[in-house]
Amino acid sequence: MSIKVKICGVNSIPAVEAAANAGADWIGFVFFPPSPRAITPALASALAARADPGPGRVGLFVAPSEDEVAAVLRQVRLDALQIYGPAPTLAQLRARFGLPVWRAVAVGCAGDPPADAGGADRLVLDAKPPADASRPGGNAEPFDWSVLRGWKAPVPWILAGGLTAANVAQAIGVTGAQAVDVSSGVETAPGLKDPKLIRAFIGAARSAPTPA
């Protein structure tokens, strides 16, 4: 099975084209203004058009109301909703919008990976943010991957947090991840995606030994 790859925080034409041309499985659009990767729904729609019919489109939201999600979906078609923080129940979001819901989980120690999906279709395991962080993810910090040894995932999941082309193969080997998510690890500055780094990351992930 080939490793699946999500390039998150896509916010420019070169980035979206690099992700699509290199074979990313998903591209992520951030709808959280404090993030340097945040974009408007109108821009997300324009970028998504440059990738058709390529990667799946994932919208990242932080503690959104249903109305906030609806406002985005009126302008851009998404294939999944990735949710950080408190939100309407995941089942409610799925029922209203008819989309898979991904639950982001902050991991810092062995007790953090959940035994229950909490109604999510997929989990995104990210590092716990630093105490002074302004956002719950995309902080270029990995967590101790060894805490996932022996964890029984309740649903499909994605490994995130501090991944780069230099460490993604090791991360896959330690965790057995079958999907990985990168944002800051393919940037030259916060919010500035580099097509060369995108291509390098996808190549490194796909070249990693496939988990059993």
Image: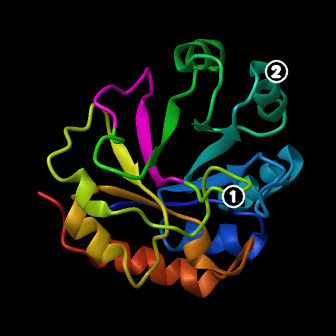
Examine the rendered structure and indicate whether residue 90 appears above or below residue 148: above
Q: How many numbered marks are there?
A: 2
Residue wearing tag 2: 67
Examine the rendered structure and indicate whether residue 23 appears above or below residue 119: below
Could you tell me which residue is drawn at 27 percent across and 75 percent down? Answer: 170
Q: Secondary structure at mark 1?
A: loop
Q: Quick one: which residue is furthest to the front in this view? A: 131
Mark pair 2, 1: CA separation:
26 Å
Q: The C terminus lies in which quarter of the figure?
A: bottom left
Q: Do the CB atoms of the residues marked 2 and 1 lie less than 8 Å apart?
A: no
Residue wearing tag 1: 133
Identify the mark nearer the N-term, 2 or 1.
Answer: 2
Q: Amino acid at mark 2?
A: Asp
Decide: few, some or many residues near mark 2? Use Cα within 10 Å; few <14, some 14-19, many ≥20: few
Left or right of 90 on screen, residue 31: right
Q: 113 or 71, which is in the foreground? A: 113
Verify whether residue 119 appears in magenta: yes
Residue 57 visible in this rendered orientation of the protein: yes
Relative image position of residue 120 (x, y in whole percent): 45, 27
Q: Which residues are magenta?
A: 114-128
Left or right of 135 on screen, residue 207: left
